[in-house]
Image: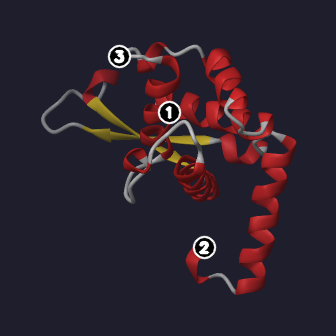
Amino acid sequence: MISNLPSNAKDYLLEIFNDVILRGEIIEEWKKLVVVPIPKPNKNFHLANSYHSIYLLFSILKTFERMINNRLEWWMRFHPLLNQQLTFRKGLGTTDALAVIVTLILDLQGAYDQIDLTLLRTKLEMYGLSPHLCYIITYLITIEQFL
């Protein structure tokens, strides 16, 4: 649906995305999550563990996440700390991209789910990302860890 918008609507959406980054706040409606329970075959439907949980995020947030990932790809290409070999590849999400950054900056091995987001934000800012973008990135990591 978003890809079929007219160009002026896409431009307006880009303005909204940039404003979110400049303010460093995710729009409240984007934070809403819908959980859809899918019953497992041959299980007692009265028990909670008899269901798979499917999490649906607001589609605009997923599009915003891809835009952030593209910006991180660009930043990684030109950042002197990192070499060209470590730039992101198409098909990987923001979390994948951040795993590379986290590993390089914090020298973590297997502790990605226990990352100190405040420390990550501080390090990203130290390497030149805007504080607002760093906040958005850590928020996106939080969502990915929850799912």
Looking at the rendered image, the quarter that the C terminus falls into is top left
Q: Count how many numbered circles sit on residues in the image.
A: 3
Front one among 120 and 84:
84
Amino acid type assigned to the residue bearing label 1 in the image: Ile
Compared to residue 19, the image places residue 106 above or below, namely above
> For the residues marked 1 and 2, what is the alpha-carbon distance in whole angstroms?
29 Å
Q: Is residue 65 above or below residue 130?
A: below
User: Circle 3: is it few (<14), some (14-19), or many (20+) Cα within 10 Å?
Assistant: few
What residue lies at 57% left-to-right and 28% top-to-bottom?
142
Q: Which residue is mark 2?
A: 2
For the N terminus, the quadrant is: bottom right
Q: Which mark is residue 109?
A: 3
Label 2, label 3: how far apart the Cα atoms are: 37 Å
In this rendering, the answer to whether 117 lies above or below 51 is: above
Identify the residue at horizontal 51%, vertical 18% (top origin). 106
Disc 3 is placed on an element classified as loop
x and y, in percent, of residue 114 in the image: 47, 13
Earlier sequence position, callout 2 versus callout 3:
2
At label 3, the amino acid type is Gln
**Residue denoted by label 1:** 101
Nearer to us in this view, 71 or 91: 71
Disc 1 on helix, strand or loop?
A: helix
Amino acid type, mark 2: Ile
Q: Position of residue 45 (x, y in %)?
A: 27, 30
Do the residues under discs 3 and 1 have CB atoms within 8 angstroms?
A: no
Q: Residues within 10 Å of mark 2 (few under 14, many from 20)?
A: few
Image coordinates of residue 47 in percent, x first then y, are 30, 21
- Which is closer to the viewer, label 2 or label 3? 3
Say which label, 3 or 1, has the lower sequence index.
1
The numbered mark, 1 or 2, whose residue comes first in the sequence reads: 2
Can you say whether 136 is above or below 85 in the image?
above
